Amino acid sequence: MARRTTGLRFQPSGGARSAPLQVGRKQVLTIERLAHDGRGIAFVDGRTWFVSGALAGEQVEARVLGARNRIVDARAERILGASPLRRAEPCAHAGRCGGCTLQALPHAEQLALKQRTLAEQLARFAELAPEEWALPLVGPEFGYRRRARIAVRWDAAAGRLEVGFRATASQAIVAIDDCPVLVRPLQAVLRALPELLHGLARPQALGHVELFHGNTSAILVRHTAPLADDDLQRLRIFCREHAAQLWLQGKGEPQADLPEAPLGYRLEPWGLELQYRPGDFVQVNAAVNEAMVAQALEWLSPRSEERVLDLFSGLGNFALPLAQRSREVVAVEGVAAMVERGRENAVRNGLANLHFCQADLSKPLAGASWAAAGFAAVLLDPPRDGALEAVRQLGSLGAERVLYVSCNPATLARDAAELAGQGYRLRRAGILDMFPQTAHVEAMTLFERGPAAR
């Protein structure tokens, strides 16, 4: 390989330097590969271009969205030479709405991209590869999403209400009349929602609207000022027509318009029902969530005499099924409201061996009373920033098996390196296709103590 010549990082006055790239400039690019976030990567004049809407092997005309140092963010404006993999995007709003960025890529290729992302992050940050790769857990490509946030903004200058989803790389709102990734009941709500909101007497009072679907549909209206009585009545009629609960949120927590109506979802294979409130974390994909819980139980293999720890337990999505198979489950969560909801779910489902505790999981666990007796197995499902502090202490709890569910391969890999340093080996790994049509990667990994199986 030829030796690179050295030189000044910054040219002196009068020396040659790259001309700055102006936002809006167009450039013809050849896309070499896809980045982990699904954008195409191209290289021109020492700059690395990340191009949304482009596939590997394509020639595109791209428009600059922003540039910093030698990194350029761009969007494909025209496809000059299409990849043979490119398919017609099923959604009419693709390319403008910022939600589903991989629709032009066939589903099998989406899964391959996510698999590569997980493998590369584990290799790069932890120097690890699993002893066994599991097949991806998949569900329907479309009609899967049971939660959605609808952006609502009053444009005072134009005197109109904007309703839709956020645009790609922008705070602009794209008017949406259909969203094929939503579950069917929410698709019907979404189609009718703009007309309802535009017809309110005081639309300036609206913040945003959230949609939910479980044992029933629910509509949460966030408002920045009290709603007019006539507007509240219109919302109630709309919810009755769509068999949906109405929830309202001003300055405090969300409140049900009819408090006696519970909102929840079932984990059918285990005969469990979990109740929640808008604002609580709930997995958006019901089919993949059930498959994920089933795979977690299979991999972790809790036994009837074992004590199991569930960290970042939320409502009890994993803890309740675990409690059906274990002597005792301790579920630990940082948010007090979620701990209370989890306790209510345990009582409602008759699980006396399940105990919910509140703790700051970014702090040491050693002094916690619930940790003193140790655990045979641990399951954790942390947020995007991972669980490094908790992971550092798992070995001291005596766990022989650790199952880690992640929504961020980079922090998973970081934490996996810490587990490897404690003598755990990466037994299995696989992706969970929780968000088809997007580059978002969910993963499950199993770590076991002891030598590799022969």
Image: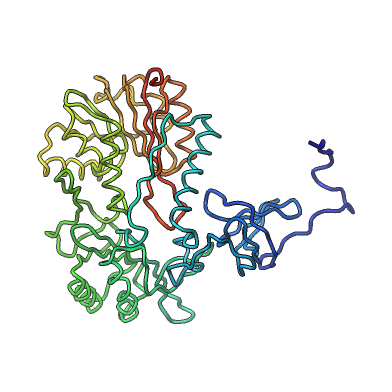
Relative to 33, say whether 333 is above or below. Answer: above
Relative to 338, say whether 157 is above or below. Answer: below
Q: Nearer the viewer, residue 385 or 247?
A: 385
Q: Nearer the viewer, residue 281 or 360?
A: 281
Left or right of 274, for residue 222:
right
Q: Residue 344, position in %: x, y?
A: 15, 44
Relative to 262, say whether 131 is above or below. Answer: above
Left or right of 135, for residue 259:
left
Q: Tell me, what colour scheme is on the image?
A: rainbow
Quadrant in the rendering for residue 451: top left
Q: Residue 228, position in %: x, y?
A: 26, 76
Say which residue appears at 27% left-offset and 30% top-offset: 309
Relative to 222, say whether 12 is above or below. Answer: above
Quadrant in the rendering for residue 385: top left
**Which quadrant of the figure contains the C terminus?**
top left
**Which quadrant of the figure contains the N terminus?**
top right
Q: Nearer the viewer, residue 392 or 334?
A: 392
Left or right of 297, for residue 119:
right
Q: How many marks?
A: 0
Say which residue appears at 42% left-offset and 36% top-offset: 133
Q: Nearer the viewer, residue 69 or 452?
A: 452
Q: Residue 260, position in %: x, y?
A: 11, 59
Say which residue appears at 18% left-offset and 58% top-offset: 215
Left or right of 69, for residue 370:
left
Q: Residue 308, position in %: x, y?
A: 24, 28
